[in-house]
Structure formats: structure tokens, C-alpha cells
């Protein structure tokens, strides 16, 4: 898997909203929950989590849609309605980006998968760590360390 070389450039489907990320991801994930199935109109969502300080909107003005607060805010292009990123207060200092919006999505292999209790029975991912629900917050430090150890395979 080729490593991404920041800055990473992403856009929505219509191109009105553009963003740039100046750091590599701290972890990548797939989420199989019914909410993600509905919001992506697909089998699961993909995430790449970055330091929020490395994330900049360079064009357009994303709007909150989907589920809105208090636990999370989903942001969309106001024009084409692409789901672009999610802010989760519990993940302080981090931002959850839909990595297939990036110019080169080849490296976005999910390192962990969440909500496998709602996974479609025919779906398989290459994730190293699987959770029926979401990983407990105390598991995050060791997950981030494990991702860093296997960085070459997952980005
Ligand atoms: Zn758009
Ligand atoms: Zn989900």
C-alpha cells in the first residue's frame, strides 16, 4: 500500500467544497452501522481520522446534515450533498474524514471495523480489529499504536 503524501486534497462530488489535510491519518476504519449504510447508500462507511489541526476547508461552506449533535455532527456539501466529514466531541482534537473524497483513495484500507453486529452478511473487509459496537475509549491508545506499527500496510 502506498503511503499518502500530505498535503492530501479532497473534494465533494460537485467540487464546490474542497479541503486539504497536511498530516497523515492516525487511524482508518470502516463502520457497518445501519446509519452509515443509509448515509453512504452502501454497505459501510470508510473513515480516515486526522489531527483536526491538520484539516482545512479551502473552498465552499459545508453544512450540518444527517445526525446533528450532541454526540456528533455530520458535514455535507450544501450543493451536491456529499457526506464529507464528521466532528465527534469525544474524539477531541481529531476529525473523521471520508477518505474516498481524496484525490488518491488507494491507501484507504480500513485498519479497524466497527458495528459488525449490523454488518451485511456478505461483506468482508481487511480490517485487523473488529468490534461488535464501537471500541471503548480506553482501547484507543493501543489501537493508534498498532496502526502506527502497521502504517505501511494501511496507508
Ligand atoms: Zn458538492
Ligand atoms: Zn456507522
Image: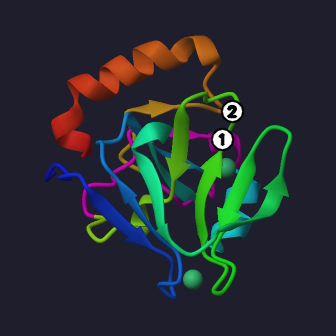
* 41 relative position to 15: left or right: right
According to the image, label 2 marks what residue? 133
Occupied quadrant, residue 111? top left
Secondary structure of the residue carrying numbered label 1:
loop
Question: Quick check: marks 1 and 2 in contact, CB under 8 Å?
Answer: yes
Q: Nearer the viewer, residue 126 or 59?
A: 59
Q: In the drawing, what numbered circle is on residue 26?
A: none
Residue assigned mark 1: 115
Q: Where is residue 81 in the image (x, y as percent from the top left)?
A: 67, 79
Q: Would residue 94 appear left or right of 37 to someone viewing this image?
A: left
In the rendered image, residue 117 lying in the magenta stretch gets the answer yes
Dot 1 beta carbon under 8 Å from ligand 2: yes
Residue 95 versus residue 137 in the image, above or below: below
Does residue 51 appear in this view?
no
> Label 2's element?
loop
Circle 2 Cα neighbour tier, 10 Å, few/some/many (<14 / 14–19 / ≥20): some
* Cα distance between the residues tagged 1 and 2: 4 Å
- Which badge, 1 or 2, comes first in the chain's sequence? 1
Q: Quadrant of ligand 1?
A: bottom right
Please state the horizontal and vertical placement of residue 25, each as a whole percent of the image: 35, 41
Q: Residue at x 42, y 21 (%)?
A: 143
The answer to whether one can see residue 119 in this image is yes
Say which quarter of the image contains residue 135.
Answer: top right
Coloring scheme of the render?
A: rainbow
Tag 1: Cα neighbours inside 10 Å, few (<14), some, or many (≥20)?
A: some
Question: Where residue 43 sits: x, y (%)?
Answer: 59, 65
Identify the main secondary structure in magenta. Answer: loop
Residue 7, compared with residue 87, is above or below; it is: below
- Residue placed at 69% from the left, 41% from the top? 117
Q: Which residue is pictured at 82% across the width and 56% down the height?
A: 67
What span is colored magenta in the figure?
106-124
Amino acid at each position: 500500500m502506498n503511503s499518502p503524501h500530505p498535503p492530501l486534497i479532497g473534494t465533494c462530488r460537485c467540487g464546490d467544497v474542497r479541503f486539504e489535510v497536511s498530516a497523515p491519518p492516525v487511524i482508518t476504519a470502516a463502520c457497518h452501522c445501519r446509519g452509515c449504510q443509509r448515509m453512504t447508500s452502501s454497505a459501510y462507511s470508510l473513515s480516515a481520522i486526522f489531527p483536526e489541526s491538520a484539516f482545512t476547508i479551502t473552498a465552499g461552506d459545508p453544512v450540518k446534515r444527517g445526525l446533528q449533535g450532541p454526540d456528533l455532527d455530520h458535514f455535507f456539501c450544501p450543493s451536491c450533498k456529499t457526506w464529507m466529514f464528521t466532528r465527534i466531541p469525544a474524539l477531541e482534537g481529531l476529525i473523521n474524514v471520508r477518505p474516498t473524497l481524496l484525490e488518491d483513495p488507494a491507501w484507504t484500507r480500513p485498519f479497524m471495523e466497527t458495528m459488525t453486529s449490523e454488518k451485511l452478511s456478505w461483506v468482508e473487509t481487511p480490517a485487523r480489529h473488529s468490534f461488535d459496537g464501537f471500541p471503548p475509549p480506553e482501547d484507543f491508545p493501543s489501537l493508534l499504536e498498532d496502526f502506527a506499527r502497521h502504517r505501511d500496510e494501511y496507508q
